[in-house]
Image: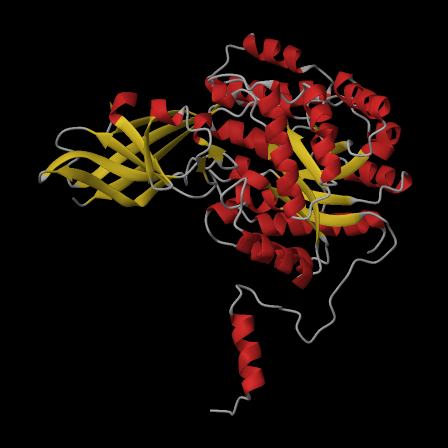
Amino acid sequence: MSKVTRREMLMGTSAMAVTTGLPWKGFELRTQTEKSKLRRGVSFYSYQEEYYKHEMTVEDGFAEVTAMGATGVQLIAEEMVPNYPNPPDEWVDNWHAMMKKYNTVPTNIDTFVDIYVGGHRKMSMDEAVETLSGQCKLANRLGFKVMRPTTGPVEEPAIEMVERALPVAEKYDVRIAPEVHAPIPLGGKYIESYLELIHKTGTKHVGLTVDCGIFCKKLPRVFLEYCARHGAQRRVIDYVASAFEGGSTHDQIVAGVQKMNPTDGDRLCAGMSGGYGPITNDPKDLKKIAPYIFNIHGKFYEMTDEMREYSIPYEEIIPVLMDIKYAYSIDSEYEGQRWIQDAVITDSFEQVRREHVMFRQLFGEI
Amino acid sequence: MYEAQMILTRGFQNVYKEGQPVGFQFLLKTAYYRGTFLDLIGAIDVSVDGKAYSREQLSIGVKGRVFTMEEAAKAEDVHWDFGTPMIVTILTPGGLKPGIHEVQVTLGVNPSYVPVGLFRATGHKRMTLVM
């Protein structure tokens, strides 16, 4: 047995005290090159299945972000914050310690104001504002400068709620960035309402989170195959896919399928197809809202062996983000697991890695 | 989502009073992608070997407290964490016989960004009860 000094023993003990340690110890820490102001990050939403199965800890997520040379950490508060919305001080201290240890930064915290309380009643506006304000406090405790609250139905802006929470957002220096999520059109009422609020109040604490699922040009293949495994007929799947690509609206697709003597699986396919696009969204239109984009959800469903997203044209989106000098983070948001986990074993880490290779290619780094 | 993973085998057992089985229980994880306060749980429909049990026979255990479904609807500050199982207890005299059972659960969760009733996940598990 070799002799170990007290110092070496203590170092060993502290390294063993964590789940993953510092794998690069003794090596240079890799960092992103500066060809682009865009930063890469990961929403831990991407790793939900491994977390759910207790195959990883939050710290493992940090280590993986660093292993990809990325810097951003995004969190769904109710997915991984213990004792939500009031995590213990010890957990919060460790959260900050991990940020430091892994050379990462908090990008965006995703929260929910469930205004319909599970359908049992509707929150009063005071209650909703209080809930949103509490989430600003949590964001501040965890060092997030941007927060994405989902404030009710996807396509309904919550102007009064956000406006009334502004003093708290300012106090805690948290910028509220509601999400432009499919099927919201760029340039519709949702975005206009928030721009009006920003202009009316002059606030610097309201902006937008943009989810790239709004740019789907095709329906995810993993979704269509899920439908096939759950009773959808091939001719109906083909109709839904080509109608989507051809620009049919969701209502038209649902009506079209209704005429095809549909099975439950066919109805599922038609119904869920409304959660992508709409196809009329053009990445170039991000230029019109450029100053207000505080975070990008790098939504994806399936990264192919060619390092491209099957449905979303990142090769059109990234150049626009570089053109507008977007200087915040694009955070991986893997959502394909829900369409494959009934058939195969999910590897979220592999999928996220592929997206980051794509990002590096499109940033011009490799 | 998580249909294949929501029902846990470990913990499946009868519950006893005065030495007699008065029901059974098992562990259930959410099938939604985040934890939720209990009021968001719209339904937990349980059947075993094709026999459906009523809402009135069911209670849930979360964070060391037990709730009927009616109480859960008002438990707006009790959070069922993502990936953490709750204990589902069904009161039925005699409980279940030792051996293999086909357990089916349909879980409804009602976040406010989609219409009530839209999110439902049904899991099945063939699992063995010892006693």
Q: What colour scheme was applied to this rendering of the protein?
A: secondary structure
Q: How many numbered marks are there?
A: 0
Residue A159: give x, y in percent of width and height: 72, 20
Residue B75: x, y in percent?
42, 28
- Which residue sits at x=83%, y=58%? A33
| Residue nearer the viewer, A123 or A146 | A123
> In percent of the image, x 62 and y 68: which residue is there?
A22
Q: Is the residue B127 above or below the residue A224 in the image?
A: below
Taking the image as shown, residue A207 lies to the left or right of residue A131, namely: right
Using the image as rendered, state which of residue B69 and residue A276 is in the foreground: B69
Is residue A165 or residue A323 the one in the foreground?
A: A165
Q: Is residue A282 above or below residue A319?
A: above
The C terminus of chain A appears in which quarter of the rendering? bottom right
Residue A365 x, y percent position in the rendering: 83, 55
Q: Is residue A136 left or right of residue A261?
A: right
Residue A219, quarter of the rendered image: top right
Residue A199 placement: quadrant:
top right
Q: Is residue A34 above or below residue B97?
A: below
Q: Is residue A211 at least partly visible in the picture?
A: no
Answer yes or no: is residue B60 visible. Answer: yes
Toward the viewer: B90 or A182? B90
Q: Which residue appears at 12% of the width and 32% of the height?
A: B94
| Residue A79 place in picture, x, y as percent | 54, 41
Q: Is residue B58 above or below residue A294?
A: above
